[in-house]
Image: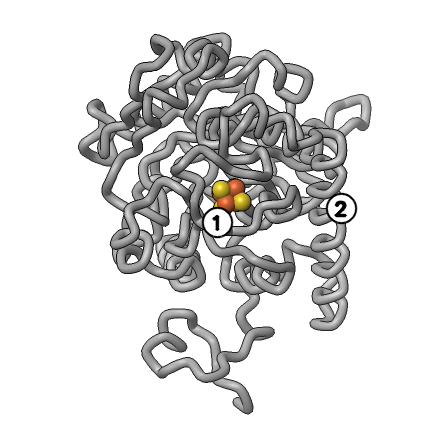
């Protein structure tokens, strides 16, 4: 069991005259997960509705959550809304009060690991009737996400948006902030922790996306492991680690990656490409063409129809179940009986073929030590 959100430093308990114990600490909303593995944000537009529905069903079946991406929430996903994390990105596509209220949590996307510092572009030819409806833009028009949010130029501006989203949803929903894994991710995360945000998502440079320019994908950003380790250390050093949960994403390719991310300081992880592979994706890197033969990254009706959401959701749920079981086995082998005890427990990690500088950032010893 994993809980994402702020944790109180201590609990204020009072005994009533009746003998009952009363909890007087005001707890903030947390997300409760059966596994620390969630499905990351992939928008309707970037992928087909069939693919989104399949993953949403899998998230429900596995007791976890899935991100909507920045494309709004299609009515076909309403039955799974209590498992959806709705995203607010710089284009604000599909964002209205109904959208915010339907989600189990809200995520503000500031940056993306595969393309830090740049925005997004969904070409008009992909904007069909359904996408036009959920994104609230005219059919056939380009959907451009600016690089920055035009109302956020400082950590105070970000805190104001977090507060605004919480206010709009009566402080009932956790709010996450997603940033790209870059050299100063630790300082940014410490700023996010001082806002009312409940979790910070650190998105590593190996995150897959069909929309990143090759030069950004291959040369900008840093690995999620290094960023998570430095974020966890900075939050501990400043005594604010319990004020915010840390979610690792971008490059989680197996259960061992989940275990390593948690041991380096993450509370949970997002998977993306792995879920697509479970549905048939061959990682051909041609998502931007909109002609995915597996019916995933396409809106062409004949190609979309190739993906059976019933079968695909079973495959994704199996993947999450299998990785969760493997994670339990890894914990058992390390002599640890809970995810909470594994979090930031670098004593259990050793670096192999890593240079001294990286070992220092990760704060792990080398093999044999
Ligand atoms: S098979 Fe190719 S086009 Fe389809 S989702 Fe995977 S990488 Fe993208």
Label 1 element class = strand
* Element type where label 2 sits in the image: helix
Point out which mark residue 318 bears: 2
- Residue sitting farthest toward the front: 302
Q: Please rate how many residues cluster around mark 1, counting C-alpha atoms within 10 Å: few if below 14, some from 14 to 19, many from 20.
A: many
Please give the residue where the numbered disc 1 appears in the rendered image: 249
Report which quarter residue 148 is drawn in.
top left
Cα distance between the residues tagged 1 and 2:
20 Å
97 is higher (above) or lower (below) than 162? above
Q: Is residue 276 left or right of residue 160?
A: right
Quadrant of the rendering where the N terminus is positioned: top right
Residue 47 coordinates in the image, percent (x, y) = 50, 31
Give the number of callouts.
Answer: 2
- Tell me, for residue 174, which label it has, or none: none
Q: Residue at x 64, y 26 (%)?
A: 305
Crowding near pointer 2: few (<14 within 10 Å), some, many (20+)?
some
User: Reading the chain from its start, which is encountered first: label 1 or label 2?
Assistant: 1
Whole-percent x and y of residue 146? 23, 29
Between marks 1 and 2 in the image, the one whose residue lies nearer the viewer: 2
Q: Report the residue at 48% width, 49% height from top.
A: 249
Pinpoint residue 261: horizontal percent, then vertical percent: 53, 59
């Amino acid at each position: 069991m994993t809980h994402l959100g702020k944790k109180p430093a201590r609990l204020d308990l009072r005994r009533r005259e009746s003998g009952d114990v009363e909890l007087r600490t005001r707890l903030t909303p947390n997300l409760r997960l059966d596994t620390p593995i969630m499905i990351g944000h992939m928008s309707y537009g970037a992928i087909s509705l069939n693919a989104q529905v399949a993953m949403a069903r899998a998230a429900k079946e596995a007791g976890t959550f899935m991100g909507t991406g920045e494309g709004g929430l299609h009515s076909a996903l309403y039955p799974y809304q209590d498992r959806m994390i709705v995203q607010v990105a710089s284009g604000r596509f599909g964002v209205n009060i109904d959208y915010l209220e339907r989600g189990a949590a809200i995520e503000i996307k500031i940056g993306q690991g595969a393309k830090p510092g740049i925005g997004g572009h969904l070409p008009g030819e992909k904007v069909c009737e359904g996408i036009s409806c959920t994104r609230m833009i005219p059919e056939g028009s380009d959907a451009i996400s600016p690089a920055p949010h035009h109302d956020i130029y400082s950590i105070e501006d970000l805190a104001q948006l977090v507060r605004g989203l919480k206010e709009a949803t009566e402080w009932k929903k956790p709010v996450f902030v997603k940033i790209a894994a870059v050299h100063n991710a630790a300082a940014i995360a410490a700023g996010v922790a001082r806002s009312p945000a409940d979790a910070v998502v650190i998105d590593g440079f190996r995150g897959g996306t069909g929309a990143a320019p090759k030069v950004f994908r291959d040369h900008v950003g840093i690995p999620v492991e290094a960023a998570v380790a430095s974020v966890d250390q900075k939050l501990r050093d400043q005594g604010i680690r319990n004020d915010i949960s840390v979610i690792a994403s971008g490059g989680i390719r197996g259960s061992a990656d989940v275990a390593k991310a948690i041991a380096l300081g993450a509370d949970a992880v997002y998977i993306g490409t792995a879920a697509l592979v479970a549905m048939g994706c061959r990682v051909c890197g041609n998502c931007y063409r909109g002609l995915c033969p597996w019916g995933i990254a396409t809106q062409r009706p004949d190609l979309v129809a190739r993906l059976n959401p019933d079968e695909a959701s079973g495959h994704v749920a199996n993947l999450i179940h299998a990785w969760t079981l493997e994670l339990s086995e890894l914990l058992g082998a390390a002599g640890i009986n809970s995810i909470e005890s594994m979090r930031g427990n670098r004593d259990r990690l050793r670096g192999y073929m890593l240079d001294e500088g990286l070992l220092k950032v990760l704060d792990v010893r080398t093999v044999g030590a």
